[in-house]
Amino acid sequence: MAGHNKWSKVKHIKAVVDVKRGKVFSKLSKELTVAAKHGGSNPDLNARLRSAILAARAANMPNDNIERAVKKGAGELGGDAIEEITYEGYGPGGVAFMIEVVTDNRNRAANDLRVLLSKNGGTFADAGSVAYQFSRSGEIRIPKNGLDEDAAMELALEAGAEDVEDADNEWILYTATDQLFQVVGALRDKGIQSSSQKLIYQPATPVTLTDLEQARAVIKLHDLLDDYDDTQNVHANFEIADEIADALA
């Protein structure tokens, strides 16, 4: 079982702020559009779209918004074509970043991210120079709701997950990429509704930040990259040391 990740607490605080700012709907809309573009508009035949719709409904996204995003991806509404790109970079302390972007202008996105990185102690990296430090995995988050560590591990293994991590009020289950939606379904059959499910870049060897100012610089860069309009997800290979986590939170 993976250890308790204090960085999850910091991310949770930011996620609450993002909900208030309405940024969540924008990212959900893009995920719906991209999922429909690559796999079609029928969620019964498109597992990624089915997952995106579940996430949108969990966030109380209006049905009209969901339908419009899916139609856009299916080419029914026209408009600029969008594409998925993953950019790579380094931050302060050599922290590695994988930045998933959905954009209608890849040159603009690359330039903007290059500027964000360079102005905040980071560097834009060539494709492949960072990616080897990560592996692609499925991530499922479920509320604890009284579920202790042993019960969470037993549930995860029975559902087909590979590992479990403690993240304050949630358990994070990790799966093989091709098992993500099957595990979500198995959990649902057991009466467990996930709060999110998605593919992530999981760091092979996390860097533990122990210096408070360096940690602040890394988190600032993470937030700036995450707040960029075209960003969908930001993955990084750092964790926060326990002794400075409370000061950051």
Image (cartoon, helix red, strand yellow):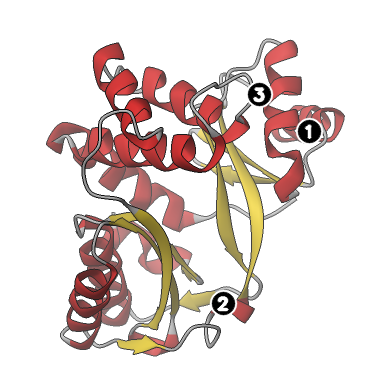
Residue 234 visible here: no
Mark 3 element type: loop
What amino acid is found at the position of numbered circle 2 in the picture?
Ala
Q: Nearer the viewer, residue 109 or 11?
A: 109
What amino acid is found at the position of numbered circle 1 in the picture?
Asp
Q: Which residue is mark 2?
A: 131
What amino acid is found at the position of numbered circle 3 in the picture?
Leu
Alpha-carbon neighbours of circle 3 within 10 Å: few (<14), some, or many (≥20)?
Answer: some
Please identify the quarter of the rendering in which residue 92 is found.
bottom left
| Residue at (35% x, 81% y) in the render | 211
Spot occupied by residue 17 in the image (x, y as percentages of width and height) = 20, 40
Sequence order check, earlier mark of 2 and 1: 2
Spot occupied by residue 120 in the image (x, y as percentages of width and height) = 20, 82
| Residue at (21% x, 79% y) in the render | 111
| Alpha-carbon span between mark 2 and mark 1 | 33 Å
Please identify the quarter of the rendering in which residue 215 is found.
bottom left
Alpha-carbon neighbours of circle 1 within 10 Å: few (<14), some, or many (≥20)?
Answer: few
